[in-house]
Image (cartoon, rainbow, N blue to C red):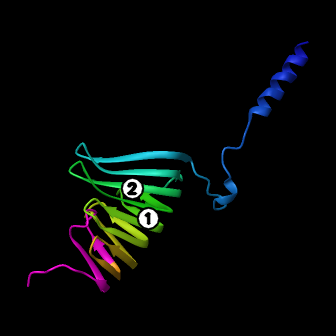
Amino acid sequence: MKHIAYIFCAVLLLSSCTKTGDYGTYTKGRVPDQEIWNTTVTVTRSGKITTKIYASHLIKYPNTKDMYIRDGMRIDFYKDGEHTSYLTADSGMVNDKKENIIAIGNVVMVSDSGFTAYTDSLFWINDSNKVYTNGKIQIFSKNDTLYGTDFVSDPKFENWTIFNPLGKIYREFDD
């Protein structure tokens, strides 16, 4: 009777083991030490929120300061605790130490002031509080449509520069 109980326990333990991830998609010899699905990471400075990162699948490898995001992400930006803009992308990377962000694939950035930008990749540098892309970008507002390359802005879209612009703008500028 004891043998049957031991066999039953062994079968129960073995049948409850499952594979938690598909490690065939990772680089050989490089398996993450942390994986989180459907998570929110809140970054603060002096007690005020600067960014909120919503990740479908967040991956952290050992001995690195980078967190990789797959399967979709959204990042909300704040200034002095107030929401200013957000971006969405297919994937990205967040540096744990410097809190810099790279958004990759179908990047859309929408400011609360009414601007929307589309690009393939966008970088946010935490220290300078600037977003930029070296690639093509499209910017739309209620009255403006701009295309160009090499774009730099604050996350609020209040102060921005687009290089090699092409498009229509209906603003009056001071000389």
For badge 1, the amino acid type reads: Ala
Distance from disc 2 to disc 1, alpha carbons, whole Å, reads 9 Å
* Magenta span of residues: 151-175
Magenta stretch encompasses residue 107: no
Q: Which circle marks residue 103 in the picture? A: 1
Residues packed near mark 1 inside 10 Å, few (<14), some (14 to 19) or many (20 plus): many
Q: Is residue 87 above or below residue 160?
A: above
Give the side of residue 149 with respect to residue 38, left or right. Answer: left
For badge 2, the amino acid type reads: Ile
Q: Residue at x 79, y 33 (%)?
A: 15
**Image quadrant where residue 65 sits:** bottom left
Q: Residue at x 85, y 22 (%)?
A: 8
Residue indicated by mark 2: 75
Give the side of residue 134 with respect to residue 115, left or right. Answer: right
Give the side of residue 8 with respect to residue 174, left or right. Answer: right
Q: Secondary structure at mark 1?
A: strand
Q: Secondary structure at mark 2?
A: strand
